[in-house]
Amino acid sequence: MAAGSSSDDEINVGASYSEPMRWNDLFADLESQLEFGQWEAVEQDAAELTRGMWAELTLMDRLRAALGQRMRLMLRDGHSYTLLIRAVGPAWVGGVDDAGALLMPREAILSVDGDLRRAVVPRRPLQAGPKMGAVYRMLARRREPVQIAARHGRTIAEGTIDRVGRDHLDLALHARDEFRRDAALRGLRIVPFEAIQLVRASPRGLDDI
């Protein structure tokens, strides 16, 4: 389903998973008005349809349509990152820059610079991708060394994720350029999800996510 407006905005939507048939009556009404030559009314109703669809979109829906594109994201600490968007979840975005892979929760994003005139809305919630906790568990299973930055922008820990709870993770502390082994460990740090602004991993950190 696609709709355009006078400003050339575009919405490409697979279907809304909340109410996938909510627009059917309006479409039928538009067809009836066209049949009777009521062009002005059709234009007004089409504009209202477009506004209504935009009102239901999330930032993740719009970023999902930007997969494979470069976007500049500013985070709450004021730092900006230009990413090649590789993965988008229900409330997170992942991409790669020159230094590796980055994962950012939705709450950490202050603004996005880029052309986001399109959107992709999942047909069902599960098609929106894994939640942030599930992504952390994937990194833990891979024994992927990560670096975690908190909401103030400073690095608070680096190492390997050992365990992931409902709202926090346990990180075995060691240098990111070392493997997780007893001789390299400097302790264990527990980090609440809500404290995390950014997780940096290797360039292959987003593979299969």
Image (spheres, rainbow, N blue to C red):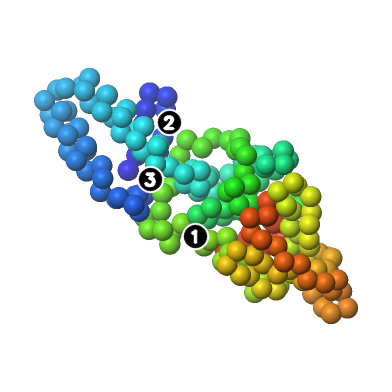
Q: Secondary structure at mark 3?
A: loop
Circle 2: residue type: Asp
Contact between marks 1 and 3 (CB within 8 A): the answer is no
Q: Quadrant of residue 186?
A: bottom right
- Give coordinates of residue 29: x percent, y percent: 17, 34
Per the rendering, the mark at residue 129 is 1
| Residue 149 visible in the shown view | yes
Pinpoint residue 18: horizontal percent, then vertical percent. Answer: 34, 52
38 shown above or below 157: above
Inter-mark Cα distance, 1 to 2: 26 Å
Look at 21% across and 23% down and name the residue there: 41
Callout 1 touching callout 2 (CB < 8 Å): no
**Total number of numbered labels?**
3
Q: Which residue is mark 3?
A: 13
* For residue 16, side relative to residue 63 (left or right): left
Residue 112 lies left or right of residue 202; in this view the side is left
Q: Where is the N terminus found, in terms of image quarters?
A: top left
- Type of amino acid under label 3: Val
What's the amino acid at mark 1?
A: Gly
CA neighbours of label 3 inside 10 A, class few (<14), some (14 to 19), many (20+): many
What residue appears at the point 42 percent right and 24 percent down from the top-left corner?
7
- Residue found at the far left of this picture: 36
**Residue 114, placed above or below residue 138:** above
On-image quarter of the C terminus: bottom right
Q: Which mark is residue 9?
A: 2
Q: Position of residue 168 (x, y in %)?
A: 64, 65
Residue at (84% x, 65% y) in the render: 175
Label 1 vs label 3: CA separation?
16 Å
